[in-house]
Structure formats: C-alpha cells, structure tokens
Amino acid sequence: MIELRDVHITYPGADRPALDGVSLSIAPGETVALLGPNGSGKSTLARLCNALLVPDAGEVGVDGMATTDDGRLWDIRSRVGFVQQNPDNQIVGTVAEEDVAFGPENLGVPSDELRERVGRALADVGLAGFERREPHMLSEGQKQRLAIAGALALEPSYLVLDEPTAMLDGAGRAGVLETLARLSARGVGILHVTHQLEDVLGADRALVLSRGRVAFEGTPAELAADPERAASLGVEVPSFLVMVRALAAAGAPVPALPADAEAVVEALWPS
C-alpha cells in the first residue's frame, strides 16, 4: 500500500505550501482519481509516491518502506511506476523495445527475463508487433501507451500517472483508459492524476485538492452528482452527465452514471 500521512511540502520561495496536511492511501488493485485545478498540488503529490520528492513533514510509505530511506529507493521505484503527462519526456530508446527495456535493464534483469518482460509489457498496452517501431513514428496515444509499457516492464505494484490523457485525441484517450482498466483488474494500484472527471468515472475513489489541501474525498459518482460543488472545486462535470440529470428528472430511462454520451444514447435507443 502507498500511504501518505499528514504530508507537508513547501517549495523554496513559495508563499504557501504545495501540500498542507494531506493524507491518502492506495491499495493494490485500487484506482484513485486525483483532481483539482492547476497549482492545487496534484503533481507534487504524484511525485511523492515514488520518492521523486520527499515531504518536509509527515510520512510517505510504500509497502512499509519510507521514501526518506535512501537505501530503499530502488525498491520503491521498482514498485511504483511513474508516467508523465508528456511521453516524449521519458521515451529514451531508438525503437519501442529498447525503450521498454531501459528500466529493467538498468536494474540488472537477466536478458532472457528482460525479453519476456518487454514482450509482455508491450502486449499489455496493445503494442505487440511494434517492437522495432521508432517512437517518433507512433501516434501520441501510442507514445503514451509506450511510456506506460516502460513502467510496466519494472513489474510495479502501483502505477502513478500524471495527466496521461491531457495531450491525446479521443482515440488515444480511449486506448490509454482501456489499458488502465485492464491493469487495475489485474491488481495494479493506480493513482490517476487528471483534470477530466470523465476519465475517472470508474475509479474507486476520488480526491480533489485545492491550494494544497484535500477539499473532497469520496466517489466520482458523488462528485458528478453535484455539478455546483464540483465547479466550486475547479472540477468540470462532463456536459453529458448534466444532460443525464435532466433526462432522469424527466423520467427518461438513463443510467445513473454512464461512461460516456454513447452509453446514454444506447440506453435511450437500444440497438
């Protein structure tokens, strides 16, 4: 389990803490959504989870290992994969398989096992057959899935993703979200940092940060059901969910929390 307990952190020269007394836990197989406006502390919290940052006060632990323990950094970062918003910032290989192999190869994984890990990770993200493809020849969605594969090759127990769909079109976004759903079903704990409530409607829990503090903790459904409160927290409820509330109030047979607008259409006009 990843555990943050009463965490505080302030950047040098800042006039307020980036995080101010935040607590959070992420269990294996659990998907936690982290939302909030720019500057709320989302990326800071994400980086605390695998010791890219350490708190000024409070504690961060990964499966009982403190992130302040320099002797456990490799163990922690092997268990907590990290995926950045822009995949170009973490793709280092000249072809896909080299990029995915980079992390485990640097951990000394034997060559036979390395090949198995690379093949498995690429298959997990739907890029089997792309082993020799050059990253610059991939779409943005495929690049993001390649970055996820690179993290998966470390065989992490947890995956932290900092706005992984922010730069993607609809098809790319759908591919990444489908990948995350499969990984969660396999028992990988996921922290999904996002501005888009629509991307995390299936999450187990949602946390909203505001000025470094927890302003909401509950389920995505609870947040989606109260657009006014969500807006006050800097979270926009998807327009199709606002429409669903109006349709439900009028007696239409719509699902309470559809995944997307297509699900609403299917409920109203079954194929």
Image (cartoon, rainbow, N blue to C red):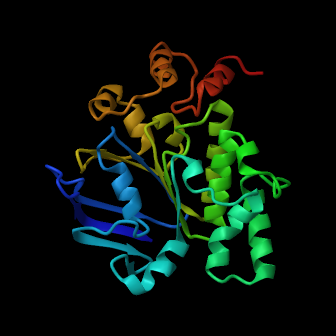
Position in image of residue 92 (x %, y %):
63, 59
Q: Nearer the viewer, residue 95 or 185?
A: 95
Q: Name the spot of residue 114 as percent of width and height, x first.
A: 75, 76
Q: Quadrant of the C terminus?
A: top right
Q: Is residue 208 left or right of residue 85?
A: left
- Identify the residue shown where x is 62% and y is 31%: 169
- The residue lying at 80 percent from left, 52 percent from top is 133
* Residue 219 in which image quadrant: top left
Q: Residue furthest toward the top? A: 250
Q: Residue at x 22, y 68 (%)?
A: 56
Q: Residue furthest front?
A: 94
The quarter in which the N terminus is drawn is bottom left
Residue name at image x 40 percent, y 61 percent: 47
**As displayed, is residue 145 above or below residue 227?**
below
As drawn, 84 above or below 69: above
Residue 4 left/right relative to 159 = left
Q: Nearer the viewer, residue 257 or 9?
A: 9
- x then y, percent, for residue 222: 39, 38
Q: Tell me where residue 173 appears, x and y as whole percent.
A: 62, 38
54 sits to left or right of 119 = left
Q: In this orientation, which residue lies closer to the viewer: 183 or 114?
A: 114
Q: Give the farthest residue toward the bottom.
A: 71
Q: Outermost residue toward the right?
A: 129
